[in-house]
Amino acid sequence: MPKITYVDHAGTARTVEADVGSTVMEAAIRNNVPGIDAECGGACACATCHVYVDGEWAAIVGPAEDMEQDMLDFASDVRTTSRLCCQIRIKPELDGLTVTTPARQG
């Protein structure tokens, strides 16, 4: 199982195991990771699962598609590595992925 590390805005890291085929958001919710609200349940209809992908992982994760980019317009403190983690599908190549949650969602 790939391991994903979530770092909160204060710097606390939590590493969880994630099922291949699930999303980074689903792994966070299953493991009670704070800072991922996921109000829409992963439908890409809100911006409450906003994360910053660690720079070394940005190319592997890939860029946001148009619908996700539109939703990021509603997120706070958007950066070049911002993604909605409901749109990042877990695959074996993401073992070790690190994402950081913003100070606030939405």
Image (spheres, rainbow, N blue to C red):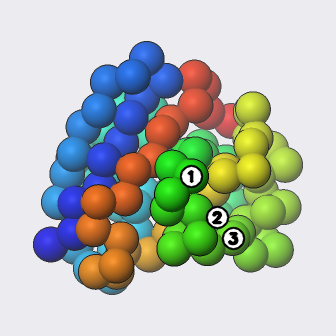
- Say which quarter of the image contains residue 87: bottom right
From the image, tell me which residue sits under label 2: 44
Q: Residue at x 74, y 43 (%)?
A: 79
Asked which secondary structure carries label 1, the reply is helix
Q: Which amino acid does the dot numbered 1 rest on?
A: Gly
Which mark is drawn over residue 63? 3
Find out whether the residues at labels 1 and 2 contact each other: C-beta distance under 8 Å. Answer: no
Q: Quadrant of the C terminus?
A: top right
Give the SS element for disc 3.
loop
Crowding near pointer 1: few (<14 within 10 Å), some, many (20+)? Answer: few
Between label 1 and label 3, give the one nearer the viewer. 1
The x and y percentages for residue 90 are 36, 74
Q: Is residue 101 above or below residue 67?
A: above
Q: Residue 50: percent from the left, percent from the top?
A: 60, 46
Quarter residue 34 falls in: top left
Q: Which residue sits at x=44%, y=75%?
A: 89
Q: Amino acid at mark 3?
A: Pro
Residue furthest to the top in view is: 10
Q: CA distance from mark 1 to mark 3?
A: 12 Å
Nearer the observer, 65 or 63: 63
* One can see residue 49 in this view: no
Coordinates of residue 8 in the picture (x, y in percent): 42, 29
Number of marks drawn: 3
Q: Which residue is mark 1?
A: 55
Considering only order in the chain, which callout, 2 or 1, is on the residue closer to the N terminus? 2
Q: Please give the name of the residue rendered at 75% of the width and 32% of the height, measured from the top-left corner.
A: 77
Q: CA distance from mark 3 to mark 2?
A: 15 Å
Classify mark 2: helix, strand or loop.
loop
